[in-house]
Amino acid sequence: MKNPFVFNAASTLDSELLLRMFISDHNYSRFIESKRNVFLWGERGCGKTMTLLYNKIALQKKANELASQDSVVEYIPVYVSCITPLTFKREHLLLEDEFKAAVISEHYFSLSIALALVESIIEIPKIVTFFDESSLGSDLEYIFDRELPSGENSLLRLKRFLTKQFILTQKEINKSDSDSFYDDTFTFTSIVIPLIELFTEAEKLKKTHFVFMMDDAHDLNIHQRSALNSWIAYRDNSTFSFKVSAAKTPEYSLSTTSGGAILPGHDYVNVDIEQPYQNNDSAFGQLARKIIAKRLELFGIQQSPEDFFPINSSMIKDLENSKSIALDLANNKYQPSERKSINDFVYKYTRAIYFRTRSSKANRPPYSGLETIIHLSSGVIRNLLEPCYVMFDDMVSKGSLSITGIAPAVQTDAINRLSDSYWKRLRDGIDNEIDGCTAETAKHVENLFNGLAELFRSRLLDESCSEPRAIAFTISAKSDEIMGQLLPILGVARRAQLLYVRSGSAKDQGAKEDYYIPNKMLWPSRGLDPVGQHARVSIQAGSLVDCALNKTSIPYKSTKEIQLSQPGLFDND
């Protein structure tokens, strides 16, 4: 039985399946099909690659159709993965000469882009008829000043030539005493731009715009990244533009090879493809439901997402009891005319009452239901699909032949196992999986998350806390010295996808500030509420550093607001 919630890399999906799975109203085509340079920012797993591939396939189909009609081709997409062996080379690290390291890096990168460009052209079958074969072949040999390999047509011969260049380059740089190769390297302006100019000499391609889709640019080395930024700063975008997907990492630099920097709005357009999830009506909430509904539909499952992932019935009942208690407390605290205050009180404390009672019985809540699964994703699509995949697989393992829903008990078990696995990663040390992370830093990250878990749990159980379910935080009292210690720890946690950074309005004068959301899949193991509430805890930078380095508890101020007492609330559970 095929699992509809497959969440492996989008690049491994069949093209037709990818087109059918993708939610088209979130494809950002208005940016991809523009002639502006665009950065698509988002955490790993949020759908950047799928967005580029969807648009690449869609644009390729349009190009095929226009070519078959012998019409002018408007766009040709060129998809370039930045984590292939062709670009993800590290030979530059072996060189002491920084200039030579930069030359090698750009050479590899430019070759990979040129090869992707040629492959994209070849993918349009009828496009070969747009060129005069003998003229194209001679022009290519003139540009490269050498004879092309033999082949069926000039485009295939060009592809073989470029492939051979990778082999020759590798051989040359492996020679410890060879410097001759540095006189024969390529740059974007010496190989890609000449090819574009040559291709657009064809009558049907004169107005063609080449869309270079640079996927996972965060994995480029520093020289390749600065080269890409320099190309983006190129003023004439009439013939080509870059659509760059990159993860939100603090070390991503926008500097160019000349030492300047590209500017948003001037050199490129910024697009944040992530959306925070606060409730069912938020952008991510709607997208998540559409994704799951589409997956179920494609695999012939005639159930709504809510019906397929039902919530535990006893939890529904207990939450209703908690809501009644919260409402009684609110009515005693506020006047009937203070309806907003009453509603806010019920929102804040209903789930807090429920989770406090579960804690008093020393057992975990039965985590289940679509809303819980969406919240556990922390706003990242891959995190949304992973527990769904595990749950479906568990049902298959139990011998289910026709799956029309995931039993709440199966959901709970899968969520708890996944949550436990996150903490095991921390205990084992994420230095084994994060490049550049030392064992000491890995231990600091583990200490920090243990401290955050204790802080959020203490707040949840503290009946005097005014925002007991807050599970996000901001950083206050920042100094250069303290942040110099803290940022590397937070950076490792972000690269491990244990911590996400979003931007929101600050309480003071509506200014923007960064706030941090630990991966919510951590919280079931600690009996916390992954749904949380729309609130953030302000933590001093020094307290976070003390916690990470010395296992010191993170302090917080408890605001005396209410005293809750609910003895025997769920005695019949």
Image: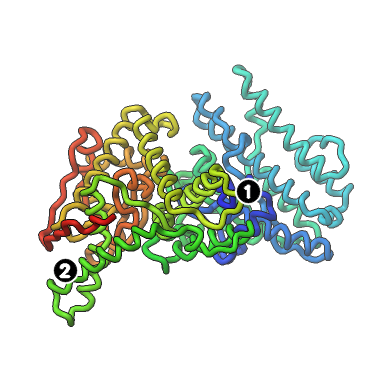
Residue 324, given in percent of the width and then of the height, sits at: 24, 68
Residue designated by label 1: 2
* Residue 341 located left or right of residue 184: left
What is the secondary structure assignment of the residue under circle 2?
helix
**Marks 2 and 1, how far apart at CA:** 49 Å
**Which one is nearer the viewer's eye here, 403 or 245?**
403
Callout 1 amino acid: Lys
Relative to 371, say whether 362 is above or below: above
**Which one is nearer the viewer's eye here, 92 or 477?**
477
- When asked about the image quadrant of residue 302, the answer is bottom right
* Residue name at image x 42 percent, y 58 percent: 369
Inspect this view and state whether residue 276 appears.
no
Q: In the rendered structure, which disc, 2 or 1, sits on the residue that comes first in sequence?
A: 1
Q: Residue furthest top?
A: 177
**Quadrant including the C terminus:** bottom left
**Which one is nearer the viewer's eye here, 3 or 448?**
3
Residue designated by label 2: 329
